[in-house]
Structures are given as structure tokens and as C-alpha cells.
Image (cartoon, rainbow, N blue to C red):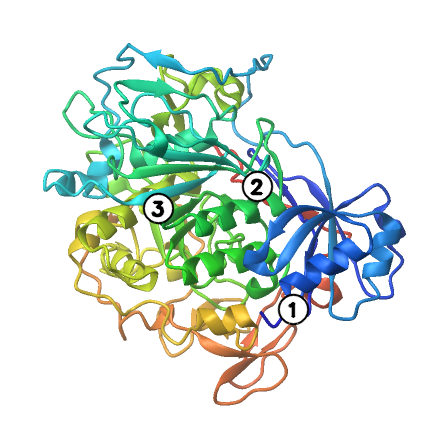
Amino acid sequence: MQRKQLIIALGLTALLAAGAELFTIRHATVPAAVSGVDAYIVQGDEYSAVISAVDAVGGKITHELSIIGAVGAQLTAEQVAELDRNPVLRIHANAQTEISAKGGRAAKKQEFTAITTEATTETSTEVAGDAYSEYPAQISADRLHSEGITGAGVGVAVLDTGIYTGPGLSGDTKSNLRIMASYDAVLDQLTVNYSKRKGFIGLEEYDNDASGHGSHVASAGFNSKLSNVGKYNGIAPDVSLVSVKVFDADGRGTYADVIRGVQWAVDNRQKYNIRVLNMSLSATPQSHYWEDPLNQAVMAAWDAGIVVVASAGNAGPAAQTIGVPGNVPYIITVGAMTDNNTPGYPGDDRLASFSSAGPTFEGFVKPEVVAPGGHIMAAMQDDSRIAMQHPEFHDGASFFSMSGTSQATALVSGIAALILQAEPALTPDMVKCKIMSGARPALDGNGNLAYSVFQQGAGMVDAHNAVYSSAYGCANKGLDVKADLAGTKHFGGRANQDANGNFYLMEMDGYLWSNDLSGTGYLWSNGYLWRNGYLWSSGYLWTNSDFSADGYLWRNNFAEASGYLWSDGYLWSNGYLWSSSLTEAMSINSWVEQE
């Protein structure tokens, strides 16, 4: 990788809210401002040279992050100052802080009881006969289940707080063990490797999710339990699950932990046949997409053949609220819609008010699609942290209702698994194209888009349409992930902003931003013709200093011919660096009201 960077550990908070203070170490800057901060990510042109540099100053390497040519390290102020003299290195520091849930209804405060990791045998059939299967039917996944397309043979890694491996999660539709591995990126430890266990009968629990978020996400996408109407509660109930735990029980973590989780998934993709990586988390962008170290790891995963599905974030409905890593142009970014608690009546379905919207700061349309994300019923233990903070949403058995783009993301990850079962040889770009081409945009009574493409992308996903779509080449046109990773080329999208502050797509009329979510609802229809074959999903070569036929000039406060105008704060302080005045917002998506 041709990067002249040494990047250190940015704060990645976890459960439901933000909270790590960032500090920037710049060349010729005395690091007095980071007193007491000793966690860093160190990145350079050559991975071995970075290791040698840290070793030479006596630093302690905590994370081997070769996926981005970096290491996590503990360094003293003197060691930082010595490394800072290296002209090809760049340093960012983080101080981790505790976080707490924000927003939502008043939480009932209860003392947290630690969950044991002792294995027990499950003998009950708790919540047998529940009917929480509306959302698989809403996106036509149930039609595929009846055809035998259930995600069998496809490995899905859920990068989150862990997975409670109880009923519907540890076993597939035939009660075969299907959680193949559980990796704790915080401890750098493979805690469970089910693939080596023989003669497994029944369901066995390993309670490794004290938060509840990871279990809820995994259940929404992949629960294998049958409801009392004989339908599965998950989108892809037969996938092989891999738990990649990057957050602790209190929702704390670091960028280094998450990057190490992504790297572990990439390194073990063949062993566990990991084809899909679910990332139901987001952070406020603080640099171009290609400069963020987590985004670099995500792009490397995509380049390695893994379909990465990430949440748009819960910071909507305002424009340009897409988080990291959802702002990576290559991956599939997911927003949320809600059925208004009337699953049998689609006429009042609408975009969820919390769903983050595009465009990204590089001009890309995001999210690519939306999926059900309102009041999703999925598995969560009643003694997990989220369930105890919001007990009013737990059914008293094993299901919990939660809203967010996290849940919508898991549904789309399930669709990706269904596609890959049907066509195992597809590339991530092809899977993305099929999902987009099968989606149904929301239309008003006149057949026009009810929401901008910056809010709904191609529309609400349809699993059946996606699996049987004949479109394969409509996504990521003009982009080059290998060149992006190498640092030789970066890309911008077609989005622009006019003098009145309206966002639009260049070369495509009639796609103006709309922030009106006051309507009673709209139908998600297949009857809309996307002109020019998803022209908006392509990209242009980024130019940072001049305009030419190959690129577009970006400006902060004025427009230029064929250029871009962003009215608010496009340029980050200190030359696209994380600033000590900013607070990192990387987290599992914040709690939102049920919708």
C-alpha cells in the first residue's frame, strides 16, 4: 500500500452511543495534549518497517493489523515523539471513555449480572409458537425458503458484541450445529471452534453476548426457529455463523479491535467459508473514505471476495449523515423502513425517520437499499444489557423488539447469503448489483419517487427478486478497489449540491433531495424505471487539485464548472485529519424510539 501514514487507535465506542476523545499527533507537534493516552495504530508504507520502527523505540505491539499495513501499539509520550520524527509515518491517538445508551424511552435501571460462559444443554422450547415472521415475508424471503434456498453452505461473520447461542441461533433448520467459530477480537482469542466438535446432539449454549445487540442482529438475519404459522424467523436460517466479538459487555472497544476483527474474518474466510461480513455499526466520518483505517480494512475484505454489508446509521433524516464504514463506495450500505405496525397493509409503509441519508462527502449515493428496520422482533436474553435497560420491549421469554438500521443490515446480509447459495461463484460486485436491481423504490400516487435516492437508494430489498435477477454488472462501475487500497486512485460519485442547498445527481434530472417524511406512507413498487442502468452507482476518478476529463474539482465554499458545492463543513480540519477537538462517534448504532 502506498500510504505515507502512521495511524493510531481511534476510539471506537460500542453499545448504543458514542464516546472516545480523539487526539491527533502531527509531525513537529509535541504530544503533550495526549498525556495519559498510550493506545495507537501505527501504519506505514511497509508493514515490516512499521513493526521495526515500533520495536526500535521500545513500544509494545498489541494488534497486528497487516490488513492495513499497521500495528496497534502502546507507546509512551517519548516513544511517540521519536516515531513522529519519521516523515513517512502519521499518528492518531485515542482515549477510551465509558458510554451509555442515549435516546429511546426511559430505561429501567437494574444491576447488571454477569453472564456465565459455562455450557448447558437446552431442553426447553421457549417461546414456541411465536409469530415474529412478518419481515421475512415482507421482503419475499419466505418464498425462497419454500424453494429450498435458505443460505445453506454460506458462511456469515457477524462483527458485533458476540452471539448468544441459544435456540434458533446455534442450530440450523435441521438442528445441526451451525456456529462454526467465535472469535474475541478484544482478547485476540478463539473462544469457541465448533467445527472441531463431533457427535453434537441438541442445542448447546455459550453465553458470550452480555450486550444483546449482536444476538439481536444475528437473529434478525439468520434465526432458524419456526413461528406458529410455519415460517422461519430469519432471512437465511441455514447459514454457517461466525461470531466476531469486537465490543465488551459495556460497549467499549477501539478501532484497533474492530480492524483486528475484520482482519480475522479475512484471514479465516476459506476455513469457515466466510462470504458475508455483517457490520451493524457506524461512526461520523472524519476524513475521506479512503483515509479512515477501518474503511481501509473493509475495502480489503471486499477485495478478498467478502460481501460487506454495513448500516447507514441512525442519525437521519438529515442529508450527509451516512456513517463509517457505510460511506465506503464499494460495499452495500443499508437504511431502514417501517411498516407502521401494519405488516398486512403496505399502503402506510414509509422510510424510518432515524435512517441516515446520503450523499457521502465524496458524492456517492448512499444507502444502496433499505430494509425493514422498525420494531424488529429477534432473539435477546432478558439479562443482557440492552434488555435490562429497556425491559418494556422484551417478551419475557427470548425475543426483544428493537428498531434501527442495524437490524435492516442483518436482513440484507441474509439476502446476500441466499444469493450466494443459489450462485456460489458470484463476486461481491455481482451480489451488490443483484440486490440493488431487485429492490423496489417507494413511489407516490403519481408514480414518482416518494423519497430521494439519497434516502432510499434503489428502494426496499426484495429477496426473491434479487436471487432471480439477471443483472450482474450494475454496481461499482468505474471504481477500482485495488487502486484505491494502493493509494494510486480515489473516487467521487455523481452527487452535487446546487446554490439553494439541494442535492442532486449530475447527468440525471429529477432526483432532488427531499427531507419530507410527513406522509402517511407509500407503496414500494417494482414499476419504476431507473434510467441509464444505475448510472448513479458508478464513480469518477477523484482529483484534489484540478479539474480534468478524469475527475471533478471539490470546493468548500463555492462552485466551479462541473464541480461540487458543499454548503457545510466539507473540509475537515487539519487537512482531513482527526482533530483533538472532535469526539469519535464509532459505535453500535444508537438506540432509537420504536418506529
* Left or right of residue 285, residue 75 in this image: right
> What separation in Å lies between label 3 and label 1 (alpha carbons)?
52 Å
Q: Quadrant of the N terminus?
A: bottom right
Secondary structure at badge 1 equals: loop
Q: Report x, y in % for residue 393.
A: 42, 20
Please tell me which of labels 2 and 3 falls first in the chain.
3
* Left or right of residue 233, residue 289 in this image: right
Q: As shown in the figure, which amino acid type bears the numbered disc 1?
A: Asp
Q: How many numbered circles are shown?
A: 3
Q: Quadrant of the C terminus?
A: top left
Residue at the disc numbered 2: 587
Numbered circle sitting on residue 45: 1
Q: Report x, y in % for residue 154.
A: 28, 45
Q: As shown in the figure, which amino acid type bears the numbered disc 3?
A: Gly
Residue at the disc numbered 3: 519
Secondary structure at badge 3 equals: loop
